[in-house]
Image (cartoon, rainbow, N blue to C red):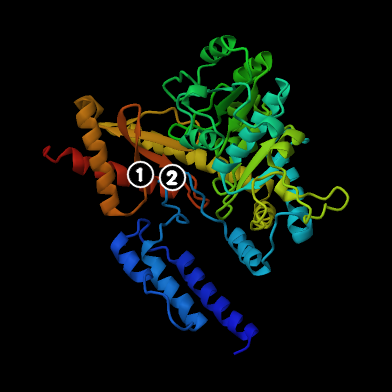
Amino acid sequence: MDDRQSFEAMARCAMQHALAYREDNQRPPRPGATVQSLRAAFDTGIPEQGRDPVDVIEALVAAATPGLVGTIRPGFFAWVMGASHPVGVAAEWLVTAWGQNAGIYNTAPSAAVVEDVVAAWLLDLLDLPAESSVGFCTGATMASSVCLAAARHQVLRQAGYDLAQGGVFAAPEIKIFLGEEAHSTIFSGLRYLGFGEDNLVRIEADGQGQMRAESLATALADWSGPAIVICQAGHIHTGGFDPLQEVITICRSAGAWCHVDGAFGLWARSVPELRPLCEGVDGADSWSVDGHKWLQVPYDSGFAIVRHREAHQRAMGISAGYLAESPGNARSPSQYCPELSRRARGFAVWAIIQALGREGITEMVARHCRCARELGRLLSGEPGIRVLNEVVLNQVAITFGEDRGTAESNRLTDAVIEQLARDNRAFVEGADWNGRKILRVSVISRQTDREDIEHLGRSIIDAWRRVATKPPP
């Protein structure tokens, strides 16, 4: 069999399995495999001689399928994870077949140009400053890290210090001001950049996890050195937004860089009725947002957006004698993210924006937020169930049996989550928030509609009624 025939056979096999998986609507969303069973299926040893490629694909599918999570199903609500739009999946197949290294223009001209085009589209869709630069990263974790690296360079430069020359150890101290309920990945990104706990000033949050602007103003007034403020568009449990306009105004007065963690919440900018949640966000200095959440791009996809292009390039730029300069004003992708070798991330984003269009993106985000509000309404009418958050976006935080005291409520909430896992009709998960257990629902799968939400609401109420009538252990 020649290379073409072999590849065609492998591709046909893989596509048939992919189609069968995506069309299987009866598959439970939560996988039943154990660590031990998956390890046994995969760990067949290194063969002495190569196997038939089609047999290898068949074996891979057989080993992996029992451990696949139903993230592409409309009944997936466990985390803020998109459902990989089919056109993005098809585009990613081409990306892999094309084998382009999207580090610099000369190694992948089409990949470089499509990123440039899509970057402008993203700024348009999110209504952010057109002069901003965009780095195509693995996700919002790395996107935030890239933005904060640019911020570090810029605030030190404003303080008269050249970070590229002097390095971090001799640099003036930078204080990082952020809400006490900032997402965990922000703290990780700061650690990657060399910031420790002593560099952080945690700002008090309200009952929805939103930073209190007046507390930020007081804290900034007590500091005269370089400062970076990190605010949030979309709290991971409540969907709440920091008071962005107030925060950004305070930052401007203090000369602080303002970064917005908008992993999923920034997409509210695309929906007219949700835009007030993000009022003033375009006045910030940088923004991080995921593509593989609300835009439904296959993993991995995130965007580091920086108003100050030169600061972005100073932080990320890679140069070497063997790397030819891009012709004219052509984009060099490695100037905006920390990778010289990477997959071409722009093609799938291009395909999805073209397939959905502005109206399709707006409709999907608006529908998900309506679904979340409907779930909150359905559950709030059931005795013993309390929705803890103001449902302003796509997140619903729920607790059970609150009138029985915190400890008993935590036990009952865990029990409801366990019951739903056993039922395995929808995939939801719990979390610890402010000393209590919650059931956390994220409406993010592209197909999810009101019927799916009604089904989820009935499932949660049914699980609660069964748990509530059981005698305590």
Say which quadrant the N terminus sits in: bottom right
Q: Which residue is mark 1?
A: 429
Q: In x, y percent, where is residue 15?
A: 54, 73
For label 2, the crowd category at 10 Å Cα-Cα, with few meaning under 14, some 14 to 19 and many 20 or more, is many
Q: Amino acid at mark 2?
A: Trp
Q: Give the side of residue 43 with respect to residue 405, left or right.
A: right
Q: Which mark is residue 338?
A: none
Q: Amino acid at mark 1?
A: Glu
Q: Nearer the viewer, residue 82 or 463?
A: 82
Q: In x, y percent, where is residue 471?
A: 11, 38
Q: Are marks 2 and 1 in contact (CB under 8 Å)?
A: yes
* Kind of element beneath mark 2: loop
Q: In x, y percent, where is residue 373?
A: 45, 35
- At 56% from the left and 39% from the top, the residue drawn is 263
Question: How much space separates mark 2 and mark 1, taking CA atoms?
Answer: 8 Å
Q: Which residue is mark 2?
A: 79
Rendered view: 255 above or below 443: above
